[in-house]
Amino acid sequence: MSLENYFPIWEKLTPAEQDRLTGCVIDKSFKKGETVLHKTSDCTGLLLIQTGQLRVYILSEEGREITIYRLLDMDLCLFSASCILNNIRFDVMVEAEKDSRVFIIPARIYREIMEESAVVANYTNEIMASRFSDVMWLMEQIMWKSLDKRVAGFLLEEMALEGTGKLKLTHEAIANHLGTHREVITRMLRYFQGEGMVKLARGMVEILDVKRLQQLHEG
Amino acid sequence: MSLENYFPIWEKLTPAEQDRLTGCVIDKSFKKGETVLHKTSDCTGLLLIQTGQLRVYILSEEGREITIYRLLDMDLCLFSASCILNNIRFDVMVEAEKDSRVFIIPARIYREIMEESAVVANYTNEIMASRFSDVMWLMEQIMWKSLDKRVAGFLLEEMALEGTGKLKLTHEAIANHLGTHREVITRMLRYFQGEGMVKLARGMVEILDVKRLQQLHEG
């Protein structure tokens, strides 16, 4: 499969633009757990996900993490090429959550095309608007949803992503997704277990009662 | 003063685009405290601030607020015209914090120009990237900065905006900016007063020790 099968606005590009992109794109694989991007300022290039799953997160000075969004098949990651925009003043990290294969489009080439092409600039705009909406949603969650609701929501999201209720997840990993401490997550999961919503085992959370988790999440 | 004095990329527009914008722009004034935008989905149009100060904030179901950014002279507010972008899935509210005069550019016209013009699309991109950065900064503050640091930072920001250390601010207003409860702010300000950093009076916070507030904020 080549770039044209993954790039949503391929047919709206001029042949010259298509040639430039095809000529510069890099095809790269990442193993599960591998770091894809250390910090935004590296400006690796745009990541276009062929298969797999990437996690985009921010990191505090003390090493705490919070997941801001995930990238799945066909998603495009702008902030790995933040140098295409002058006004990006934050750093994100990206890691592979599953074995992943991505196209990397060098930032300089994309920027040059975007400066000339209203189609590419508007497409970029829509991607950013979508990520912006993700972040606003997350901020509302953090501000106004209690942690039990957020943990319930996270477990349901994982179940949907993995296609199974038996989730291989450490408490540390959940804490890093939600921007809190491992101890806090352990306490919450034990409460969930006591209520019969999940069953805990080493490195594993099994979802037993989807309906109650949904009620908790939405309530 | 007309639109061309305020619109940063005016000279890069075609004469036809300039004419369209000039022909549709609305000049409107808002009194201090007045609501400029009830919710994003109204899609009033782009706001270009001539003079004054607008506050952009989100509102929880329970009526709690948090300021996401302020708009000052020459700033452009995209999210009052979120219908120009398909992927905006959040609502903001906008109110005038000072008597303000703004240009309103109808969303439909702006969108039509943006779809054709790489210059306008890229400009829009840069504005969104800038607001995105503001929101990421805010999220890091909320996640990882304690409230005393955030209150200190907010008072210093207000002092810079107002050009005076005598700030007309209720505890309720500060709580709404920072997304917390009035009681929490009152307790914090009393602590600041006890430490000699501020002096409190009815509807007023006077900053006494800028240096210590800065140390607290950055520490």
Image: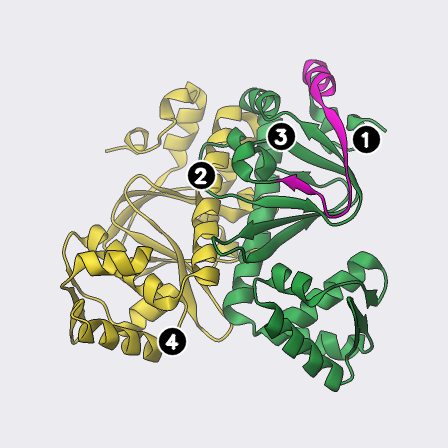
Chain colours: A yellow, B green
Q: Position of residue A40 (x, y in %)?
A: 49, 55
Hey, what amino acid is under mark 3? Answer: Gly
Q: Which residue is mark 1?
A: B5
For the residues beneath circles 4 and 3, the answer to whether they share a chain is no
Hey, what amino acid is under mark 1? Answer: Asn
Q: Position of residue B136 (x, y in %)?
A: 53, 56
Q: Quarter of the image for the N terminus of chain B: give it.
A: top right
Q: Position of residue A38 (x, y in %)?
A: 43, 61
* Depth check, front residue: A33 or B105: B105
Q: Residue at x 31, y 29 (%)?
A: A4
For the residues beneath circles 1 and 3, the answer to whether they share a chain is yes
Distance Cα–Cα, label 1 vs label 4: 51 Å
- The reply to whether dot 1 and dot 3 touch (C-beta < 8 Å) is no
Distance Cα–Cα, label 2 vs label 1: 31 Å
State whether residue A88 appears in this view.
no
* Count of numbered badges drawn on the protein: 4
In the image, which disc is placed on residue A181?
4
Which image quadrant is residue B154 in?
bottom right
Q: Which residue is mark 3?
A: B45
Secondary structure at numbered mark 1:
helix
Hey, what amino acid is under mark 4? Answer: His
Magenta region: B15-37
Q: Residue at x 27, y 32 (%)?
A: A2
Secondary structure at numbered mark 3:
loop
For the residues beneath circles 2 and 1, the answer to whether they share a chain is no
Which image quadrant is residue B198 in?
bottom right
- The reply to whether dot 2 and dot 4 touch (C-beta < 8 Å) is no
For the residues beneath circles 2 and 3, the answer to whether they share a chain is no
Left/right placement of residue B113 relative to residue B12 reads left
Q: Which residue is mark 2?
A: A127
